[in-house]
Amino acid sequence: MQLGDLKTSAEIAESVIKSVALVVAGLWAYRRFIVEGEHEESLCLTIGTKVLPSDRADVRLVEVRCDLRNVGKIPCQVELESSTVSVSRVGGDIKDGNVVWQANPYFHARFGTNGDLFNIPVGAAMSRVTFVAVPHPGVYGVRVIIAQTEQAARLFYRRMKLPFPADWKANPSGWDDSVIISTGGAEPEKLKAQTVLGDTIGAQA
């Protein structure tokens, strides 16, 4: 066999190996994220806010609406005791995105107590509305955290081959969303919206 033939054979072998590797990787990704992922909860969380007038010039009422829809293929359970809504003062250069949230929320409330669960069928939705009186004028960050059950969280971490967090009880996983508003006007001025993926507010009494 000539040198040119050897080179051609090596190139063909390399091409076949790469093709097989791509097929295997594709099958692995399909099984992990499509087949197995179909058995995981999938929720869409959105929050809306309105700034309402009050009978005091230095106070405004913030209406916080939380809408949660099951967009997955299986029913979903939400742990209400660890699901919270909070309103915090914010500062910093908001227009440039350098937002500083106060460590202690001005308002913090749970959606339930004593391990309450809420079942959301496939395609169904739940809504919660909370009213919070805040000093005016001011800039506030509104944040909603929806906690998944520990069983669902363990399934997710197992599928992703990740260790289950030891502090999960204090900082449960799930879904959250936040928005920054100003009370400076009859209608809310949305200065900057952002989704916060980490730094979950810990359990508070």
Image (tube, rainbow, N blue to C red):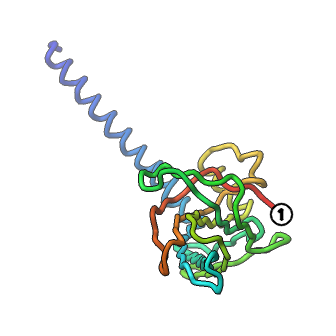
Rendering quarter of residue 36: bottom right
Viewer-closest of 191 and 84:
191
Residue 76 sits above or below residue 149 on the image: below
- Residue lying at 58% horizontally and 84% vertically, measured from the top left: 53
Q: Is residue 88 left or right of residue 31?
A: right
- Residue lying at 70% horizontally and 64% vertically, measured from the top left: 106
Any part of residue 72 in sight = no
Label 1: which residue? 205
Rendering quarter of residue 4: top left
- Residue lying at 62% horizontally and 60% vertically, measured from the top left: 89
Residue 96 sits above or below residue 136 on the image: above
Viewer-closest of 83 and 96:
96
Quarter of the picture holding the N terminus: top left
| Label 1: which secondary element | loop
Residue found at the far front of this picture:
57
Q: Position of residue 26 (x, y in %)?
A: 40, 48
Q: Position of residue 6 (x, y in %)?
A: 20, 18
**Amino acid found under the numbered disc labelled 1:** Ala
Q: Position of residue 69 (x, y in %)?
A: 55, 77
